[in-house]
Image (cartoon, rainbow, N blue to C red):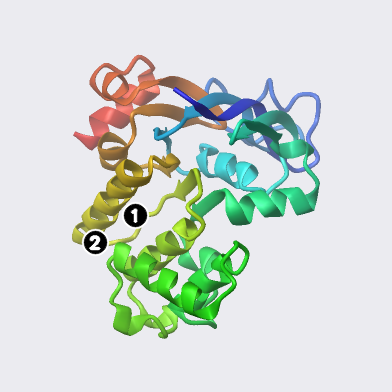
Amino acid sequence: MKKVLSVRNLSKTYGTGCPLCIASTGPEAETNVCPHCGSVVAIHDVSFDLYEGEILGIMGESGSGKSTIVKNLYFDQIPESGQATFYDANQAHPLFELNSAQQRWLKNHRFGMVYQNPHLGLNFNISAGGNIAERLLMSDLMHYGEIRKRVKTLLARTEVLLSRVDELPRNFSGGMQQRVQIAKALATQPPLLFLDEVTTGLDLSVQARILDLIMEIQQELNTAMIVVTHDLGVIRLLAGRTLVMKYGRIIETGLTDQILEDPQHAYTQRLVASAL
């Protein structure tokens, strides 16, 4: 199986940090806030691999650090330490060693991101179609007719009515905004997609349709995905493998079925039991 992403020892602290931060935080300390300097150890020593066509789940409660991982990998934040390598067309890209122009190119062409809050992923001042066209303009498509055709194909693929192509996203429901975000993320057919709590706050029926859509995309395009969620139902449905996080550390990792059927860590056991 072809490796798409390799992450090693990724760490991120918010604040000045001090020599006691790491020893004073984490699952054993039951906090990610350093009692000595007040810094927040968002993630520490996170390592994992992702393969072509795989959906990797990152699960944990609010404040566990799961969203910080994807924000660092998508260049929304700068990590404190660690390495991440993206493998694309037999070329290895060391993500945190690239200059800002190279990072921007990867972000626009080879990565896709769907945020929990659509305001982060969409420009609410331009139409739904305009949001997708904006991303397509960064690719090889330059002809207006071609772009318009591709926009309509993507909206149809994500079940957005074509009659609404020129409407502003603010007029859409939350579920529809997420569909436009997914269409935008898929515009350049990226081999790597990040999904950060994409079903949070949506009605159950809308959640189900969004999750079905994500599975269809993964099967059709063989896209590798990282799905960040606190929802065990989402993990169970989508992820082949899962990382469980608590206070910035990975506390358990393995096949999703294994983790949900026979959790080893007491924290994972509580999470699974609370969802039953």
x 44%, y 27%: residue: 243
The amino acid marked with disc number 1 is Thr
Placement of 85 over or under 136, stated as above or below: above
Left or right, 27 with reference to 158: right
Q: In which quarter of the image is the C terminus?
A: top left
Residue placed most toward the observer, 273 or 210: 210
Placement of 3 over or under 192, stated as above or below: above
Mark with earlier residue (1, 2)? 1
Left or right, 50 with reference to 207: right
Left or right, 9 with reference to 1: right
The amino acid marked with disc number 2 is Val
In the drawing, what numbered circle is on residue 199?
Answer: 1
> For residue 120, which quarter of the picture?
bottom right
Q: Is residue 137 visible?
A: yes
Q: Is residue 158 visible?
A: no
* Cβ atoms at labels 1 and 2 below 8 Å apart: yes
